[in-house]
Image: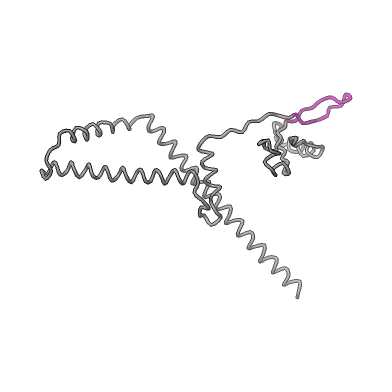
Amino acid sequence: KAPPQPDESDIAVHQQLCELNEALLYLALDPSGLVGGGGGTGDLPIGIFESEVVLVGETPTPRFARLGYKVDSIESERIAVDHVAHILPSGESSSASAFSQHLNGMHTAINMLTERIEIISRYVAAVQAGTVPFDHALLRQVKALCARLPALDSDAFRAEFVQDHNNSLLVTQLAVITQGAALTNELIDKFNVAYDRHSRRRGIF
């Protein structure tokens, strides 16, 4: 299916907007192209245009020139959109998103790591108290593990940690915005129902 094309009414609207900002792009959407995924091509049923003035019979005439575009997103955006798409208006999740599954896997791994760290800590404390005999091979492994910990205190680790933290905050913010929009929509529906009943009651009397 051919991408949407602007008409004369679109040009008129665009000229009005150009009075506020001369460097505007015009986005045309064909809703019918959404059915069937853009005609089976996988392309979005949109067109992006910029205005230009050409001489038609020595008369300056505005027209649209089509621009190319490319849809690009990073991994954190795709994860956030997938997670928000699974959130119901009540705030609950309709199904497990990829982000939720990732968090569940990380939670399980962190719990297992915490348990093993506690075991090592109790063993070292018992060795120091003399209740458990020395195992030099095992203690050397514990020392080698502890020697690797300062490597986490580096610029690369802090940068990656901050990026993951910001991505998590972004997902949380998107979820809050989605929930707020759903609650606002629910409030508007209730107001419309109440206002409609009030109008009918006034009409009866």
Q: Nearer the viewer, residue 121 or 6?
A: 121
Residue 153 image point, x, y percent: 32, 32
Q: Is residue 200 above or below residue 26?
A: below
Q: Residue at x 44, y 38 (%)?
A: 164
Q: Image point 81% across, 40% down: which residue?
A: 9
Q: Nearer the viewer, residue 82 or 168?
A: 82
Q: Is 102 colored magenta in this rendering? A: no
Q: Quadrant of residue 17?
A: top right
Q: Is residue 61 left or right of residue 117?
A: right
Q: Which region shows up in magenta? A: 50-65
Our reading of the magenta stretch's main secondary structure is strand
Q: Specify the quadrant of the image occupied by residue 60.
A: top right
Inspect the magenta stretch and tell me whether residue 53 lies in it: yes
Residue lying at the far bottom in this picture: please name it. 205
Residue 23 horizontal side relative to residue 152, left or right: right
List x then y, in percent, for residue 107: 38, 46
